[in-house]
Structures are given as C-alpha cells and as structure tokens.
Amino acid sequence: MHFAEADTMQERLIVGLDLPTLKEAEKAVRELEGTVSFYKIGYQLAFAGGLDFARELASGGTKVFLDMKLLDIDNTVAKGVENIVRMGMTMLTLHAYPKAMKAAVEAAKGSDLCLLGVTVLTSMDEQDMIDAGYEYDPHTLVLRRSEQALHAGMGGIVCSAEEAEAVRRIVGPDMAVVTPGIRPSGSDHGDQKRVVTPAQAIRNGSSHLVVGRPIVAAPDRRAAAEAILTEMQSA
C-alpha cells in the first residue's frame, strides 16, 4: 500500500489521542468528526482501554495508527503483528532494528497494514544519543535505519520532519514518511527538541503529520485541527 501520496490533506493529518482516559478520547473524536479521519493511539490511551477503542474506530472506517514501537525477539514481534493485522489497524510502529523489521514484514504480508520503522525519537538530541551509548548522531542514525527499513520491505519511516527530506531521498516516493514533533507557528514546543511547522514538514517530504497536544489540548479542538490543515495546504 502506497501512503506517500494521500488524496487530501485531511488524510495526511494524524491526530494523536494522547489523553489519559477513554472518555476524554471519545469526546475528542466526537468534537473532531468531519475534520479528522486518522488517529494515533499510543501507550497512554492503550493502557486505558484504547486497544478496544482502536478496534471500534477501525470497524467504523476510521484509520488508526497504533503507536506501540514494538521490539522483541522475532517470534514475539511476528505474533503481535499478526493480531494487530486482525484488529484492522492502518499503521503500526516498531523500532527500526533489522531483525524485528524483517519478522514484522513477513507477519504482515498480504495485509493492508503499513509498518513504520521508528528511527530516532524526536525528543532526543545528540547529547541524548551519546548518553544512550550510540556512536551515531541522530541524523546519521535516522538515515542508516531508513535504508535498513527500505531493504526490509517496510511501509514507511517515522522521523523528525527535519530529516524528512533526506529520508525521502533514501526511501523513494512510495514509502510513508510520518513525522511527529509538529508544532503550529508560534506554539510551545513542549518536550520535543526537533520540531517544525506543518507547512515545513509537507515541503520537506512528509507524507503524514502526527499532531497531538496542539489539537487535543486546545480549547477548540476542531478550530485547531482546521488551522493546521490550512497550514499544511499552504506548503
């Protein structure tokens, strides 16, 4: 499945349901109905009933990006991916380790699940990489893992929009390049260290933008989403 060229900007905006309770997530989805058609569910919501909610959304035709960042022995990754395929998810993240990616690709073969390799978390800068024992700076590791994901047959890459242009040159036009750490012009960066605006991300080659707090923590969620879509369309 080719995700690099979605039909509309609406299909390219993924709203991160980074909320503490299922009740709040359901409220956010209701408020964004008609404006947003793609949601990300990560650890916070997953452990508060979010997996059943993900199934419910998918069964109603809404796209769901399950952000689980899987990494384990090959068999465990494969069995997890097989069940996630059955859930009807649209996207799934795993850490871009070659063996894990190979196992996941084999397990998802024949399905519509887009497997995304997480390169380097957008909250990490060069000092964080050194502290974690990596010999590569973030940019170098992102490019190395992108190349490995391409060779493994993955559906896409998760990286900072700062690296999206370089990643796109490596993976070509057909793979998804999904970028978190998106902040509208003039907004607070929070704990993200490598951030860009929506328009910059689109210009850099991002196929999908993941936006959490700037939408779900906004007083008017629909207006916030519409403003980001407008920024994306201005790219």
Image (spheres, rainbow, N blue to C red):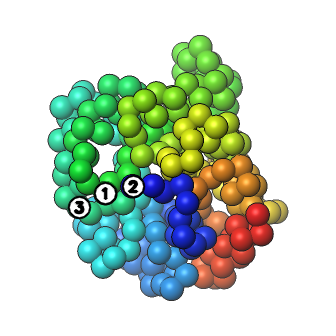
Of callouts 2 and 1, the N-terminal one: 2
> Pointer 1: residues within 10 angstroms few (<14), some, or many (20+)?
some
Q: Nearer the viewer, mark 3 or mark 1?
A: 1
As measured in the structure, the alpha-carbon distance from the residue carrying label 2 to the one carrying label 1 is 6 Å
Number of the label disc, if any, that sits on residue 112: 1
Quadrant location of the N terminus? bottom left
* Residue 147 horizontal/vertical position (percent): 51, 29
What's under tag 1, amino acid-wise?
Asp
Residue identified by numbered label 2: 1
Residue identified by numbered label 3: 87
> Pointer 2: residues within 10 angstroms few (<14), some, or many (20+)?
few
Q: Is residue 123 visible?
A: no
Residue at 69% x, 57% y: name it.
Answer: 202
As measured in the structure, the alpha-carbon distance from the residue carrying label 3 to the one carrying label 2 is 17 Å
Residue 204 in the image: above or below residue 54 = above
Quadrant location of the C terminus? bottom right
Of callouts 3 and 2, the N-terminal one: 2
| Residue contact at pointers 3 and 2, CB within 8 angstroms | no
Of callouts 3 and 1, the N-terminal one: 3
> Pointer 3: residues within 10 angstroms few (<14), some, or many (20+)?
some
